[in-house]
Amino acid sequence: MGFFADLEREDYDRTYSDLELVRRLATYFRRHGGKLAVTLLATLIVASAAASSRVVV
Amino acid sequence: MLQEDPQSSLLYLITLALLGVGAVVWMANWARRRAITRVIGDVILDLRKEAFRATASHDMSFYDEHASGKVVSRITSDTQEFAQVSILLAELTTQMVQVIILIIVLFQIDVRLTMIVLAMLPFLFLASWGFRRWARSVIRRAMRAVANVNASIKEAVTGITVAKNFRQEEAIYREFESVNRQSYSVNIRRGFVLALVFPTLNALMFVGTAIVIFVGGLSAAQGAIAVGAWYLFLRSVDRFWFPVLGLSSFWSQIQGGLSAAERVFSLIDAESAVVQTAHLQVPKLSGEIRFTDVDFRYRPDEPVLEAFNLTIEPGEDLALVGHTGAGKSSIVKLVTRFYEFQGGQILVDGLDIRSLDLRDYRRQIGLVPQNPFLFSGTVLENIRYARPNATETEIGDLAHRIGSGEWMEALPEGLQSEAGERGKLLSMGQRQLVSLMRVLIQRPAIFVLDEATASVDPFTESQIQQALQLILADTTSILIAHRLSTVRASDRIIVLRHGSIIEEGDHERLLSSGGHYAELYNTYFRHQSLEYVQQSRAAALAASTD
Ligand SMILES: Nc1ncnc2c1ncn2[C@@H]1O[C@H](COP(=O)(O)OP(=O)(O)O)[C@@H](O)[C@H]1O
């Protein structure tokens, strides 16, 4: 490796599984449930409009 | 007119409806982006807060071992990287929903062709999955490289005076250049790996479309599917690939976001080496400190203290002397509970140091490190640091008790003078005075001084000594002494060598016994003594008259 040798992990670095990471991140996002609901609804509207316009027009 | 022409009225209606849909979509899009920006902003805020709080609460050992620039990089760059990925993820979700809706539409056009398209998906996902580990490792390395660059900049900026002093700007620049180059190479490599993902997936899709054209054409020729439907299908499937492609190619970037999150969580979860067994409220301490058979080492194979015993009486002023590496700072680091020890017991007023509430305990410890650190702000604010409710008159009175306040008058605006970043607007001696004042205002039970080695002018020196006397009078003190006057002011001197106490007693006795202390005295302290100064002056005088 040579050149990249000192790109070592720090001794406190850990490896988490993707599931663990996602779960933990979800706890941060969960606090904003209301806004996420708005996002989801808006997303549905935008996506269905976009998808159908591809077919109709 | 509309009633007369149903054709054109339908056209108007469709146009209006389309406009309406357009407006709704625009609004929905706007609301969506707004909400996403808000949520992600808030999440990053929380993450940074938590990472910072965790970092601030880590032990001193953590800071000794890890470059602060790298830690900073985790709190700033890595959370930022995660934010970018989150925004991407939100986009992706929209596309995902589109894909699902499209699948429904495609199914309605032709089931068989749709099945073919769906059959391609596992291959795509398999390919993206294959890239996963690879992408993750290059991304991790890229982030470490960025952290190195940050650490190098930080070190250069904080050490700039030293560097300039020794005309080392060029060396600093070279070092920066080297980490910067490294970061460049690593990031290019990251780009190359990611650049491979997209074309590969694209090629896979190309195969998919070819199969659909072939099978669809065959079916149309056999009359199994209407030519119009085939055409419509091809048009829609094209729209289908795009988000799927996005989904898979973003996958590696999502890995980047997860790596970033991983680094931030590692920082948050970094375990404290100092572990308290209980959190007892600490009563007002009298300051008796007892080391019983204490074993301590920084690294497993290098013992620093072994079966170390020492008792410091309440109110006693103890000076620690010894060569560099003798273990003076280590003893102090254990008393302040900055480091964990491996064996034995440390009792403070008879209480196990491990059982105390650390915040409570440290409030009763006044610490003046070798290079007193001042925060940017006024001198007054710095003195008040440990007890923010101390009044200005109280501080003013105290300041006047030291050299009748002359040091304060030497400051351009008295207590209201700006200290500057790390106190750089003040002289070394003034910084020491301010840090001693800080302890005086704090009124701790235990005072720990790692005396500065830098010599200051005799005027400031005498004021420092006065401040020191005021503190020593009311506290149990542990002094890592570098000044003869400080050693002399102590009640007892402990002479350390290789982590053991080899001599103890007061200055006169130790000196007359002619042991290690006498040797240390001749090396470090003698030139500070009055006799020495007078003698050498006399010698110089004799030489000049010769
Ligand atoms: N953070 C550290 N990590 C590893 N070893 C250390 C660390 N700090 C000090 N040491 C080692 O511990 C020994 C005692 O050092 P220290 O207590 O700092 O001595 P002193 O204060 O008397 O100069 C020395 O051998 C030193 O190299």
Image (cartoon, helix red, strand yellow):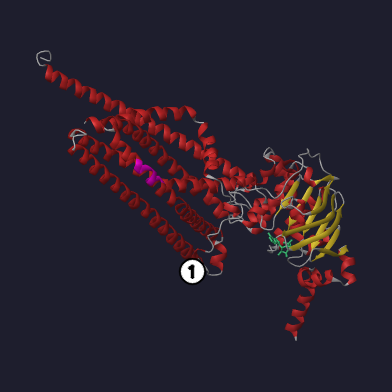
Q: Amino acid at mark 1?
A: Glu
**Image quadrant containing the C terminus of chain A:** top left
Residue B316 in the figure: left or right of residue A52: right
Tell me what residue is drawn at x 87 percent, y 63 percent: B504
Residue B451 in the figure: left or right of residue B186: right
- Magenta stretch, residue numbers: B119-125
Quadrant in which residue B63 is drawn: bottom right
Q: Position of residue B116 (x, y in %)?
A: 31, 40
Residue B544 in the figure: left or right of residue B190: right
Residue nearest the viewer, comparing B136 with B308: B136
Query: Is B275 contained in the magenta span?
Result: no
Ligand 1 picture quarter: bottom right
**Residue B527 can be seen, yes or no:** no
Q: Residues within 10 Å of mark 1 (few under 14, many from 20)?
A: few
Reading the image, the residue beneath label 1 is: B170
Tell me what residue is drawn at x 26 percent, y 23 percent: B20
Tell me what residue is drawn at x 68 percent, y 37 percent: B389
Q: Secondary structure at mark 1?
A: helix
Tell me what residue is drawn at x 52 percent, y 44 percent: A18
Residue nearest the viewer, comparing B376 with B69: B69
